[in-house]
Image: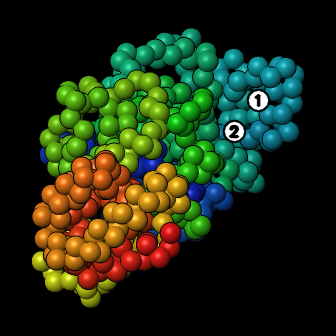
Amino acid sequence: MLERARFAPSPTGPLHIGGVRTALFNYLIAKKNGGEFILRIEDTDTKRTVEGAEKHIIDSLRWLGLEFDEGPVRQSNREHLYKKNVSTLIEKGLAYYAFDTPSDLDKARGDSKGTFKYNFTTRMKMSNSFTLGADETEARLKRGGYSVRMVVPEKRTIKAVDEVRGNLSFNSEELEDKIILKSDGMPTYHLANVVDDHDMKITSVIRGEEWLSSLPSHILLYEHFGWTPPKFYHLPLILKSSGAGKLSKRDAEEQGHPVFAIKWEDSLGFKEAGFTSEGLINYLALLGWNNSSDREKYSLLELIDEFNDVGINKSGARFDYKKALWINHLHLKDFSAESLLALSEKASTLLGEKYSREIAEEIIDLIKERLNTALDIDKELAVFIGQPKEYDSVVIEKINREVIYDILNFCKLSEALISNPKALKDRLMSFGSEKGISFGNIMKSLRLCLVGNLSGPDLFKIIEIIGPEETLHRIESLTNKI
């Protein structure tokens, strides 16, 4: 049978990375077996629908390369299908009309001191089509304002299999007769999910563990309809970096990192924070899944090839932004110079004005190992674009002023050597020996001149690229400053 998995978000807000990971695992399980990935928008709760949320979901998936084979299928267009199936259950006596008002339910909860469950122990005391006569039921149906509940059998052990947690069993006494059709005529999650998954021939349902408590009700609905249920996978939560609880937007903001794949209103996404789609997908795949090796870097195609559901963790996965940056770094350093230049319009323009295409690509190759995000490109290229705008005062204070003057004056008086960085390096080592200056202080002084701080790519490669005139200009600038 063709594997078919669906990602089924509700458009009640932007796509959180927890949702992205759910979409990714659906995609990987489908594609691992040569199957299809479907996008279904669960928009039956019109009161909670947020304008622009559906577009954010679709744009996020497309940026990440998770192209869907079908969709988006919108549940709001399938109302007739749900009502038809509800009628089938009512005819079988496996669902019933419930006319209880909110005050009726509040009273029942109050009388039971909070232990009330609407099920086989209480349904015959409530206002529904089982307790009212046919004429009264018909009259109330005409007035409207009713819901439909499913029947949960009495004293039954409901068995289910979760591909992550194994064999599970639930006691029907702990369950309620869930509402499957609301008073506004729209289905609840429980009914719509089951009906749609059957109708769309979904073979694997991969969703968050928060839906695990709904599994027995869904298994019962499949039984009521006489349908074979799909395989179920309930994924562990993505936990915040420290402390208890799942990762929220507030947690992410407090910890200084995004929580959405792409921008949503005033919140920047991982894309705007300089992540590559490849890096983010790679990190999220490893968040809650154990591969069979210590390998860290995967392309999407490699993930499809290696992913297996046996490796999905049962426990929550703690979000680690530093690890996410590291994975992104692994992808950036393997990008071609051309691809990296394309990530920064500013860098591409400025380098193009100052250097040939060949030199520009050489510069990019020189800074690759220093990139964690695409935003680092502009910062790392600054040394090749112009002289430092400021100098690290801490470094200036740590190096003896006379030592700095000696080194800078040596360079200024050795102008011919600046054109030959290798010879300059050798001569500086000799000069240091003669003057009793460590080669470390020599390098620090020169790097301070050229870069403004102690970080950056190979110093003598910088000199070679910016040329003797610019090198001497920067040495003069620092000499004047101190």
Calculate the distance from the C-alpha at mark 1 to the C-alpha at mark 2.
8 Å
Question: In the image, residue 169 lies at what x, y percent?
Answer: 46, 14
Quadrant position of the N terminus in the picture: top left
x 40%, y 57%: residue? 403
Residue 371 spot, x, y in % from top left: 32, 57
Q: Are marks 1 and 2 in contact (CB under 8 Å)?
A: yes
The answer to whether any part of residue 170 appears in the image is: yes
Q: Residue tagged by mark 1?
A: 126
| In-image side of 199 versus 56 (left or right) | left
Residue type, label 2: Ala
Q: Residue at x 69, y 27 (%)?
A: 118
Give the image quarter of residue 205. top left
Q: Residue at x 60, y 23 (%)?
A: 175
Q: Picture coordinates of residue 82 (x, y %)?
A: 48, 50
Q: Is residue 85 above or below residue 12?
A: above
- The residue labelled by disc 2 is 98
| Dot 2 alpha-carbon crowd within 10 angstroms: few under 14, some 14 to 19, many 20 or more | many
As helix, strand or loop, the secondary structure at mark 1 comes to: loop
Q: Is residue 392 left or right of residue 28?
A: right
